[in-house]
Image (cartoon, rainbow, N blue to C red):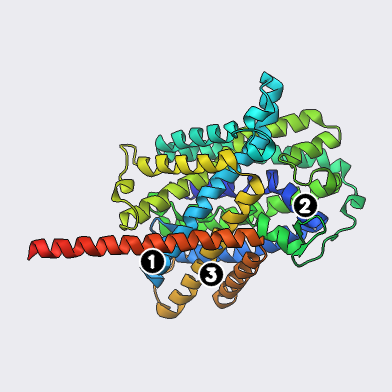
Amino acid sequence: MSWPHLVFLGVGAIVGTGILTLIGVGADKAGPAVLVSFAIAGFVCACAALAYAETASMIPASGSAYTYSYVVMGQAVAWVIGWSLILEYSLVVSAVAVGWSGYAAPLLHAWTGMPMALMQGPHAGGLVNIPAVFIIAVVAAMLLAGTRKSATLNAVLVLLKIAALVMFVVVAVPHFDGANLQPFNPYGFSKTVSPDGVERGIMAAAAIIFSAFYGFDAIATAAEETRNPRRDLAIGIVGSMLACAAIYTVIAAVALGATSFTHFANSPEPLALILREIGQSAAAHFLALSAVIALPTVILAFFYGQSRIFFVMARDGLLPKALARVSRSGAPARTTAFTFVIVSIIAAFFPLDEIVALANAGTLVAFAAVAACMLILRRRSPDAERGFRTPAAWLVGPIAIGGCVYLFFSLPEQTKFWFLIWNLAGLAIYALIRRVRASKDRSAAFERA
């Protein structure tokens, strides 16, 4: 792939559930002040993106934060980061599939009369989220067809998604009313628990919608399938972040001004709902249809990243070696199939907000690790070749680390508990793998002797 493919891969991953679906979740937690939440999450992500760009230009190999941690901080730390990335990518693919289902299910119900209960998970009164599982299967098939083919289709779908968002702005701007932004900050800045038991506040919203901005890290997993990784990775990461920051600022401001946030808070299809609220049913139908067609670009980007993380960890011997085999098209077919099974189960049975919160926990840990790797390399190898140098690295790096830590502790308490359980299980698996490998090494040495 070349750098335009990488920019489209990044934009395809970033512009997705964050603005098409999660703006409703964020508005429920912060009201109109979710605009500030977007700004905070975007700023932290921008600092992390700069650290990613420099580190990726120095270590142009697949594996993203896992590989960087392995090279800079050793295998044990790399395992923790890789284990966190597995959590992140698996849950993001599942979350986007659930968000896609939120737009697809009403359309399928209107077109076919299919009962909504057959298209929603247990959290919404149904049995299994069938549309979510279906779209994951479609994306898996695209990736098995080969990287370049899927990247080209991804670029076309990204353009469609941007066109739909431009349409939303054009239609909704005339209905902008500043009164809809009042009171601007009804729940305060820090995370607090409201009387109804929901954790609210600007930082509580920022910790959830943080996933609206990440996606550029999926670019770093494409290093070994990029023509000029030292140059193109940096362009892809920084370019996609700049484009998406501008898109998000405009869309969020227009959405919040067009109607009261209480009308679309926690809606699975907030932008389409806003258009219906202002009497633009045809535009709402077009937006929903565009989301159904184009949201799979996000699933594709993260599914791609997840299968490559599995592939690299298997190649390093930390997962079964069989997962590192590739098909004739060059795609890691076994890891893609394995990923499909995992993310389908999650998407079929769990609600969006719970999936996103736990995914963010893994991401925040990985982002902090990459920023730390950048600073360590600046100290350890100050004169090493860098395809991209982060400006003010000793300011940007600590901001990325501190911001990620603060957002992590702003996550729901239940999320932090399950993240701890996930990592304790990961450490137990790592200890078991080390013991098995040591036993095999001793046996091999004995046979040679």
The residue shown at (48%, 56%) is 85
State the quadrant of the C terminus: bottom left
How far across and down, in percent of the image, does residue 8 sit?
54, 46
Of residues 226 and 61, the one nearer the viewer is 61
* Mark 2 to mark 3 CA distance (whole Å): 33 Å
Badge 2: how crowded within 10 Å, few (<14), some, or many (20+)? Answer: many
How far across and down, in percent of the image, does residue 236 sit?
52, 54
Q: Which mark is residue 83?
A: none
Please, what is the three-letter code of the amino acid marked with disc 3? Thr
**Tag 3 near tag 1, CB within 8 Å:** no
Please, what is the three-letter code of the amino acid marked with disc 2? Ala
Single out the residue that lies furthest toward the bottom.
379
Q: In which quadrant of the rendered view does residue 112 lie?
A: top right
- Asked if residue 2 shows in the view, the reply is no
Name the N-terminal-most of marks 2 and 3: 2
Image depth: mark 3 or mark 1 in front: 1
Of residues 295 and 444, the one nearer the viewer is 444
Residue designated by label 2: 27
How many callouts does the rendering have? 3
The residue shown at (61%, 40%) is 98
Q: Which mark is residue 390?
A: 3
Single out the residue that lies furthest toward the right.
179
Q: Which mark is residue 70?
A: 1
Please, what is the three-letter code of the amino acid marked with disc 1? Tyr
Name the N-terminal-most of marks 3 and 1: 1
Badge 3: how crowded within 10 Å, few (<14), some, or many (20+)? Answer: some
Name the N-terminal-most of marks 1 and 2: 2
How far across and down, in percent of the image, does residue 381 sit?
40, 77
The answer to whether 428 appears left or right of 278 in the picture is: left
Q: Quick one: SS at disc 1?
A: helix
**Tag 1 near tag 2, CB within 8 Å:** no
